[in-house]
Structures are given as structure tokens and as C-alpha cells.
Amino acid sequence: MMSEAQFFDTLRQGLWVAVMMSAPMLSVALIAGLAVGLFQALTSVQELTLTFVPKVAAMLVVFWVSMSFMSQMLVAFFNDQIIPMIAGG
């Protein structure tokens, strides 16, 4: 049976892995949103697709580039933390 401390430690590590996996995409979305917002403020162009399409395109590129990093991080977490708990180690 898992102790309360072990449960919260595993939960904390899982949340940290989720933050580290989402950080590249969220930071690119933030930078793209700021750039598009600045462009819209400077040119007075208020088009909704102008805010959506560049952010999604940038996030897709970053997701494609960082997919191996994210999968390695998730597999390492499962191999080091989750699978030993399931196996009883």
C-alpha cells in the first residue's frame, strides 16, 4: 500500500513533469501572442484570424520539434516512478 507521503511525492513529480512538458509550447504561444498583439496595436488591424493562425502554427512547429523531448520525459517518469509502484517496488 502506498503511504500518504509517497502519494504526494509522486503527484508533485507528475505535476512537475507536466509543467516541463508544456513549457515550450506555452512560452511560444505567449511570445507569438505578444508579437501579434503588438502588430495589431501598431497597425490597428483587428482581425480574429490574425490572432489565432500564427499562434496555432507556432505551437504546431514547437510541438513537432519538442515531441521527442516530451516523450522521453514522460517515459522516464513512468519507468522511474509509476511502473515500480505498480510492480510493488
Image: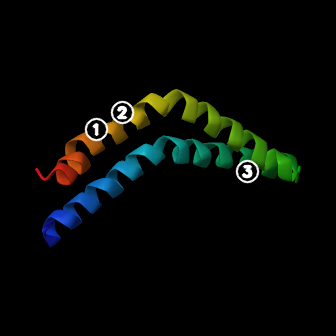
Please name the residue that numbered disc 1 is placed on: 76
Which one is in front in this view, the residue at disc 3 or the one at disc 1?
1
**Crowd rating for badge 3 (residues with CA inside 10 Å; few <14, some 14–19, many 20+):** some
Q: Is residue 55 visible?
A: yes
Q: Is residue 13 left or right of residue 1?
A: right
What's under tag 2, amino acid-wise? Gln
**Label number found at residue 37:** 3
Color style of the picture: rainbow
* Percent of width and height locating residue 7: 21, 65
User: Looking at the image, do the residues carrying marks 1 and 2 touch, with CB atoms under 8 Å apart?
Assistant: yes
**Crowd rating for badge 2 (residues with CA inside 10 Å; few <14, some 14–19, many 20+):** few
Please name the residue that numbered disc 2 is placed on: 72
Mark earlier in primary sequence (2, 3) = 3
Q: Residue at x 22, y 48 (%)?
A: 81
* Percent of width and height locating residue 6: 15, 63
Q: Tell me the distance, in whole angstroms, between the alpha carbons under discs 2 and 3.
A: 34 Å
What's under tag 1, amino acid-wise? Ala
Instruction: Please identify the residue farthest to the bottom as the structure is shown.
Output: 4
Q: Report helix, strand or loop for mark 1.
A: helix
